[in-house]
Image (cartoon, grey):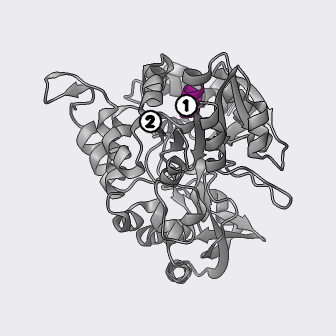
Amino acid sequence: MRLRDLPSVDELARGADDPLAIDAARVVLARAREDIQAGADPGDLEERLRDELSAARAARLRRVLNATGVVVHTNLGRAPLSEAALERVREVGRSYSNLEYDLSAGTRGSRQDHVAGILRRLTGAEAALVVNNNAAAVLLALAALAEGRDVLVSRGELIEIGDGFRIPDVLARSGARLVEVGTTNRTRAADYERAVGPETAVLLRVHQSNFRLVGFTELPSVGELAKVAKRHELPLVDDLGSGALSPSNTVLLSEEPSVRESLEAGADLVCFSGDKLLGGPQAGIVVGRADLVEKLRRHPLQRAMRADKLTLAALEGTLALYLEPERALLEVPVLRMALEDAEAVRARAERLAELTGGEVEETVGRIGGGALPLAELAGFACAVEEELTAPLRAGEPPVVGVVRDGRLLLDCRTLTDAEVEEVATAVSRCR
């Protein structure tokens, strides 16, 4: 085909009864011209038009089968929601709701009331506030409590989190001034004590997320910092990040500081994520002293950062499971996957290998999401041909695994029994 043989945009679009046909035809013809100029055959233009229309209407945010072995995978949406959380979202999302309406009084209410009570019960805090993510929670806390004044932070906690966001930058945007204390590897309570001055507004403790220093290191405990803060009548804000909700009797989760433990040790405010170890929707949760939480609630930034009704519904459904801790371990997907026995993971890997002709291989999974970076989760994967990597990602639903030593590993820690069957079908389709 030559360039002059190509139809016009209107001619090509005329055969498709679709309001998007004109735009799609332009795209198809532009690519066809590139093909012809490169000496290639542009193929069936009408078929390409149909494909372009299908792509234009396809959902961009899609369900993905996570075969990476990383439980809280930031790139794959972090925590999958429990059935209880999803039911609350369906119930609230399909109709009107009392989001900001007090049904008892018949007057305007607060959206914070729906989860504040259960957060107080679960954490022992005086008050609670929910915004759209933990970075927003920390930013709001600093803006409300320290704008124009000094915030003391250990040099060992000036970390960079996902996608280039850095704690010093978040602090600067709040309007507060950063005062670094201690050294990168060793900071003591005495360093904070010496740094306190007339312009000091807050002592900030930051969870180190995926970063850890080992060897000759030292950081003060929450209790030690709380004593310094109390002596100077300053608030201590603890950015816990990953959001382990309460002390756990499991060996793995006991390594992560919990919200209740931080408050009991003397933190005045604790900030944490909803979609990491908590296993709920993306949210930033602040709990602690009622007077400080009220300052955050009344700050102008709070409205810009507030959570929507679907987030609050999913969070309420998730938190309700924690009222029965053993139930939470079974029904919150993040907890279930993180704590599952390796032999159960092996059984799924063997089933997948049986269905695909792959080989079972031992793996090491991770919690992910900045939680427990040194923890290793013994697991098993089904190893298949590396050549399947791209086709599986392009399938429906997409399957994402890990390439290692010339093979694609489909880690079964982050797959359910039903998803193993789906992955097997996807592998068969791609071969």
Residue designated by label 2: 57
* In magenta stretch: residue 170: no
User: Is residue 139 shown in magenta?
Assistant: yes
For the N terminus, give its image quadrant.
top right
Of all residues, the one furthest to the front in this rendering is 231
Front in this rendered view, residue 168 or 190: 190
Secondary structure type for disc 2:
helix
Tell me the kind of residue under disc 1.
Ala
Q: Amino acid at mark 2?
A: Arg
- Residue drawn at (14%, 25%) of the image: 105
Q: Where residue 246 sits in the image (x, y, percent)? A: 46, 57
Q: Which residues are magenta?
A: 137-142
* Numbered circle sitting on residue 65: none
Q: Residue at x 55, y 79 (%)?
A: 342
Quadrant placement of the C terminus: bottom right
* Residue 159 against residue 213 in the figure, above or below: above
Front-lying residue, 198 or 373: 198
Check contact, mark 1 vs mark 2: CB within 8 A.
no
Q: Which mark is residue 136?
A: 1
Name the spot of residue 326 as percent of width and height, x first.
Answer: 37, 68
Residue 313, position in %: x, y?
32, 41
Residue at 66%, 43% (x, y): give it. Answer: 225
Give me the residue at 59% from left, 70% from top.
411
